[in-house]
Image: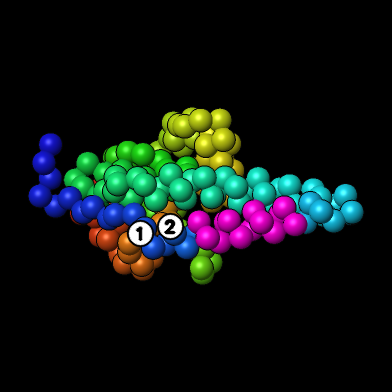
Amino acid sequence: MLDDNEIVIPLSKIKIGLLILGAAAFVVIGIRILNLPDVKANVIGLLGMGFFGLILVWGIRKLFDNSPGLIINSEGIVDNASGVAAGKVLWSDITEITVSGRYPSKFLTIHVLNPKIYIARGNSLQRLTNKANFWITGSPINISSNALSMRFKNLEAILRENFKRYKGN
């Protein structure tokens, strides 16, 4: 269905490129730490390589992904902005939008009627991350502007305005 009020927010290739460079640097640092004789350092190096390696792979995939990062329309939102993107979330499912985290890692927490549905989405790593997000923020759906071509405060304003418009609050 064509929605004249649809807002499409693209992924920012520049932000993703910078994320790739940062993740690659931390993978290299992790490799360097593995060369240290300390076992604790080796564990830290492996964990760092694993975590930032996943971010690096995600960033490279997103760099070539031409689909929008976020779509906002009369039905709801379609989140494609992170490695654990929620996909389609209907306004009728959303109960509240709050801000979580601190600068520079602020994100919008989208509280929903039945979080279990959203926790169950995705592969096993995504489901595990969804559970962790729910435990930390009270919702499995957290949207950051880090990979979007929009500043956080603008994203927050647009989502709140559309939530009010379509949810009727």
Disc 1 marks a residue whose amino acid type is Ser
Query: In terms of image quadrants, where is residue 132?
Result: top right
Magenta span: 20-32
Q: Which quadrant: the N terminus?
A: top left
x 56%, y 30%: residue:
124
Where residue 136 appears, as percent x and y from the top left, is 58, 50
Residue position for label 1:
12
Q: Does the magenta-highlighted stretch encompass residue 21? A: yes
x 47%, y 63%: residue:
18
Q: Secondary structure at mark 2?
A: helix
x 77%, y 56%: residue:
33
Q: Is residue 52 above or below residue 84?
A: below
Q: Is residue 79 above or below residue 9?
A: above
Task: Check disc 2: other Cα within 10 Å, few if <14, some if 14-19, many if 20+.
Answer: many
Where residue 20 appears, as percent x and y from the top left, is 50, 56
Asked if residue 133 lies left or right of residue 153, the reply is right
Q: Does any portion of residue 160 appear in the rendered image?
A: no
Q: Secondary structure at mark 1?
A: loop
Asked if residue 150 lies left or right of residue 103, the reply is left
The foreground one among 16 and 122 is 16
The foreground one among 32 and 92 is 32
Residue position for label 2:
16
Rounded to the nearest angstrom, the CA distance separating label 1 from label 2 is 6 Å
Q: Is residue 119 above or below residue 47?
A: above
Q: Main secondary structure of the magenta part?
A: helix
Asked if residue 33 lies left or right of residue 132, the reply is right
Disc 2 marks a residue whose amino acid type is Ile
Task: Check disc 1: other Cα within 10 Å, few if <14, some if 14-19, many if 20+.
Answer: some
The foreground one among 134 and 28 is 28
Q: Does any portion of residue 105 appear in the rendered image?
A: yes
Where residue 94 appears, as percent x and y from the top left, is 35, 44
Q: Check if mark 1's residue and mark 2's residue have beta carbons within 8 Å.
A: yes
